[in-house]
Image (tube, helix red, strand yellow):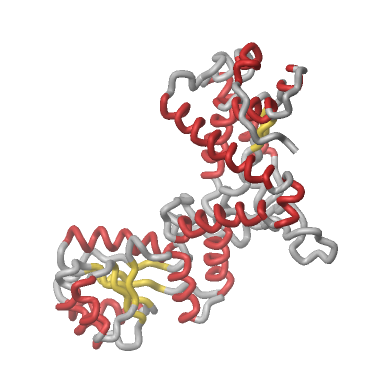
C-alpha cells in the first residue's frame, strides 16, 4: 500500500518538463522509486457513451467532437472517436467516416497537433485542472486508507462513491439543470426512434443478477436512458396524447409559458397544439373541446390565473388541466377549482411526465 505522506515534486522536475500529467506523477512519487522511467505514461482516450442519445442522434457528433478536443488539450497520446450511432445501431460507412473526419478536422483545420500545449496560459482551464487534481487526489487517499482499490471495491466504497455522483447527475437531468439536447430539452417534436433501434444499448460490466459476484457490480447506463424509455413508451402505446395550450391574457407571459410547455411535453412524445391566444375564455374552451386533446395547459400570467381558472375548470371538467407556472400567492384558490397540476422551472420533468403517462394509461 502506498504511504500517505505527500513528497515534494522537485525530484521529478526534469521529467515534469516533458510530462505534464501532474496527478499521475504525484501518485508515482509515493512509491519512492529511483527509476524515473516509471513516470513515463502513454494515454489513450475514447469518447464516452454516457452522454450519447438515441433521439436527435446527430448531436452525438458534437458531443464526441468536444470530448476529442478536450482529450487533445489534456495531452492524450492517441484517440478513438466512436461513431455517433453505436448506441442503437451497428456502425456503418457513414458514421465511421464522420468519426474519422472529426479527428482530421482537429488535426488539419484546428492544428491541435502543431502546438505543444494548446491550453497553456488559460486561467480557466488551469484552475479547473487543479481543482480536479485536488479532488481526485483526496479520493485516491481515501481509497488507499481502505486498503487499496480491490478491498475498497469489495467493501462497496467505490460503488457508493459512484452512486452519489450518479444520483446527483440523474436529479439534474430529470430537472433539466443538466441538458441533453434533443432528449430532455428542445426535442424534435415529430421525431420517432423506435424503428431506428437495431441493437440494445451497449453496456459493459457484470450483470447485477449473476450468482458468483464478489461485490456489488457498478451499474453502467447512459444519462438519457430514462427520458428515452419515457418517449418510447408513448411511441409503443400506439397513441399520441394531445396537449392543448390554452394561451390567454398577457402576451409576454403566455408566449414564454407556451414555449416552456411545448418543450416540457414534447420530451414524452406528446403532440402539442399551440395557439396564438384567445380573446375570451369562452372561445378558448370551445377550441380546447374541439381539439380533442386530453391535457389542457393554461398559459397566462400569475395575476390572471385565479381569475380565469375557475371558468376553464368548469368548462373542461373531463380534461386534465395544468397550470404553466407556480402562482404561489393564489395556489390554494386555484386548487380549490380542482386544478392540481403545475409545471415550472423547478419541476422534476421526468417524474411529472411519468405521472401524466400513468393517468393516460401509457407504459
The residue at 75%/38% (across/down) is 1
Q: Quadrant of residue 248?
A: bottom left
Q: Using the image, determine if residue 75 lies above or below residue 83.
A: above
Q: Which residue is nearer to you in this view: 272 or 211?
A: 211
Residue 112 horizontal side relative to residue 260, left or right:
right
Name the spot of residue 44 as percent of width and height, x first: 69, 30
The residue at 55%/29% (across/down) is 69
Q: Quadrant of residue 145?
A: top right
Residue 162 horizontal side relative to residue 41, left or right:
left
Name the spot of residue 34 as percent of width and height, x first: 76, 18
Q: Using the image, determine if residue 107 lies above or below residue 159.
A: above
Residue 138 showing in the rendered view: yes
The residue at 55%/33% (across/down) is 133
Residue 110 horizontal side relative to residue 255, left or right:
right
Residue 198 showing in the rendered view: no
The residue at 65%/57% (across/down) is 197
Amino acid at each position: 500500500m502506498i504511504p500517505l505522506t505527500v513528497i515534494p515534486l522537485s525530484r521529478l522536475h526534469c521529467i515534469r518538463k516533458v510530462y505534464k500529467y501532474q496527478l499521475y506523477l504525484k501518485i508515482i512519487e509515493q512509491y519512492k522509486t529511483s527509476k524515473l522511467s516509471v513516470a513515463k505514461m502513454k494515454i489513450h482516450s475514447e469518447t464516452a457513451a454516457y452522454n450519447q442519445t438515441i433521439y436527435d442522434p446527430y448531436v452525438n457528433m458534437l458531443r464526441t467532437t468536444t470530448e476529442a478536443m478536450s482529450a487533445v488539450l489534456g495531452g492524450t497520446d492517441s484517440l478513438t472517436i466512436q461513431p455517433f450511432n453505436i448506441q442503437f445501431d451497428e456502425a456503418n460507412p457513414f458514421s465511421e467516416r464522420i468519426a474519422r473526419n472529426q479527428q482530421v478536422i482537429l488535426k488539419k483545420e484546428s492544428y491541435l497537433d502543431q502546438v505543444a500545449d494548446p491550453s497553456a496560459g488559460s486561467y480557466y482551464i488551469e484552475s479547473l485542472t487543479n481543482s480536479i487534481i485536488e479532488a481526485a487526489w483526496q479520493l485516491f487517499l481515501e481509497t488507499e486508507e481502505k486498503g487499496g482499490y480491490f478491498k475498497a471495491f469489495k467493501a462497496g466504497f467505490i460503488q457508493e462513491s459512484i452512486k452519489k455522483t450518479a444520483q446527483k447527475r440523474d436529479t439534474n437531468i430529470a430537472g433539466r439543470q443538466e441538458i441533453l439536447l434533443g432528449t430532455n430539452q428542445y426535442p424534435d417534436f415529430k421525431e420517432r426512434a423506435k424503428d431506428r433501434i437495431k441493437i440494445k444499448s451497449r453496456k459493459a460490466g457484470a450483470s447485477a443478477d449473476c450468482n458468483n459476484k464478489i461485490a456489488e457490480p457498478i451499474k453502467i447506463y447512459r444519462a438519457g436512458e430514462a427520458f428515452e424509455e419515457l418517449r418510447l413508451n408513448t411511441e409503443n402505446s400506439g397513441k399520441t396524447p394531445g396537449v392543448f395550450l390554452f394561451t390567454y391574457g398577457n402576451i409576454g407571459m403566455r408566449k414564454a409559458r407556451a414555449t416552456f410547455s411545448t418543450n416540457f411535453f414534447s420530451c414524452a412524445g406528446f403532440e402539442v397544439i399551440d395557439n396564438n391566444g384567445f380573446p375570451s375564455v369562452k372561445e378558448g374552451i370551445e377550441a380546447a373541446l374541439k381539439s380533442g386533446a386530453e391535457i389542457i395547459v393554461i398559459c397566462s400570467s400569475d395575476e390572471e390565473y385565479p381569475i380565469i381558472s375557475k371558468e376553464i375548470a368548469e368548462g373542461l371538467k373531463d380534461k386534465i388541466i395544468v397550470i404553466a407556472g407556480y402562482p404561489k400567492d393564489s395556489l390554494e384558490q386555484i386548487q380549490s377549482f380542482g386544478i392540481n397540476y403545475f409545471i415550472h422551472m423547478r419541476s422534476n420533468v421526468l417524474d411529472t411526465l411519468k405521472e401524466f403517462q400513468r393517468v393516460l394509461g401509457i407504459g
